[in-house]
Amino acid sequence: MNKKTLLCIVGPTGIGKTALSIAFAKAYQTSIISSDSRQFYKEMTIGTAVPEKEELEAAPHYFIQDRSIHEDYSVGDFERDVMKILPVLFENNDLVIMVGGSALYEKAVTYGLDDLPVVPTEIQEELKSALKINGLIWLQEELKKNDPAYFETVDIYNSHRLLRAIGIFRASGKKMNELRSGIAQSRNFKIIKIGLEADRDDLYDRINKRVDLMLVRGLEEEVQLLNDYKTLNALQTVGYKEFFEYFTGAYDYNEAVRLIKRNTRRFAKRQLTWYRKDKNVTWFHYKTRHTAIVQLVSENLME
């Protein structure tokens, strides 16, 4: 291996990325960085599919439940922190793994973030007030109307990200894609990206079963404990939002479960839309043996 390498494992939620990352970590006796922006929070375990105890013990993990939902933590903070810790991890290993389904966080590390316009405070406050009055659906429709391309890839349940995009559009008249430089920032390590995929029926079946398992493990109870903090940005995510609405009496339990499954499937579709635009990702069927994937990537590293 001629250069330090960051191996990124990407793909839609529920596809098996964690298990593959463990296989690589064992093969290379190395560490895993999570780029899942909801697994950062120690109060959220079941709904974010945090790796099992034995998985966490199989390799050193970073950015897993290492902060509270009450702490503000942005994608820029993540980029800065990963770029600080990578040189330390590379001292002991030529290869480090990064795995997760938060595409913007992966991009921040592998590609860098663009300098976006500052949104004036009055626009920010105006949009926050409108959100409070009109709700998330209004925010989604506003983004879809003004920046349909970004709407197709962004997490539409993350109000913080929607507010930012709409605020930028109102302040500058520019859409998010117009503000992306298309120029990757220089990194002093090699980057290899691999993705796991499945046909739609298989993926959706895996997602539905995964939600069922979360419910058995106590997802409703976990969300109930967080109900007092439901306005926090960290909790604006699938699996939590739907139960918060159920607790208000907006709909019954069965409808909450149906919406969680539907919204998770929609989120997976958006993840794939984003990742498939990245021509640097080498895709594998999710049923491919881990040993075969490790072998193929190892051969690539030796080139």
Image (cartoon, helix red, strand yellow):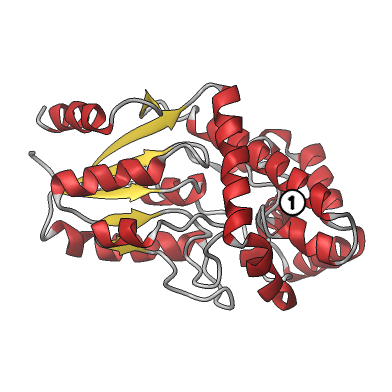
Q: What type is the residue that disc 1 sits on?
A: Ile
Q: Mark 1 points at which residue?
A: 166
Q: Find residue 110 and report its image quarter.
A: top left
Q: Which residue is drawn at 67% across and 37% down?
A: 266
Q: Nearer the viewer, residue 96 or 146?
A: 96
Q: Where is residue 255 in the image (x, y as percent from the top left)?
A: 82, 48
Q: Where is residue 112 in the image (x, y as percent from the top left)?
A: 41, 49
Q: Which residue is drawn at 22% across and 26% down?
A: 292
Secondary-structure class at tag 1: helix
Query: In the image, 286: left or right of 297?
Result: right
Is 96 located above or below residue 160 in the figure?
above
Query: In the image, 86: left or right of 167?
Result: left
Q: Quadrant of the N terminus?
A: top left
Label 1 packing within 10 angstroms: few (<14), some (14-19), many (20+): many
Q: Position of residue 214 (x, y in %)?
A: 59, 54
Q: Which residue is drawn at 59% across and 78% down?
A: 70
Q: Nearer the viewer, residue 104 or 265?
A: 265
Q: In which quarter of the image is the C terminus?
A: top left
Is 272 located above or below residue 3 in the figure?
above
Is 300 located above or below residue 38 in the figure?
above
Q: Find residue 64 and report its image quarter.
A: bottom left
Is 136 located above or below residue 278 in the figure?
below
Q: Can residue 5 be seen in this view?
A: yes
Count the numbered circles shown: 1
Q: Position of residue 267 (x, y in %)?
A: 63, 41
Q: Can residue 226 be seen in this view?
A: no
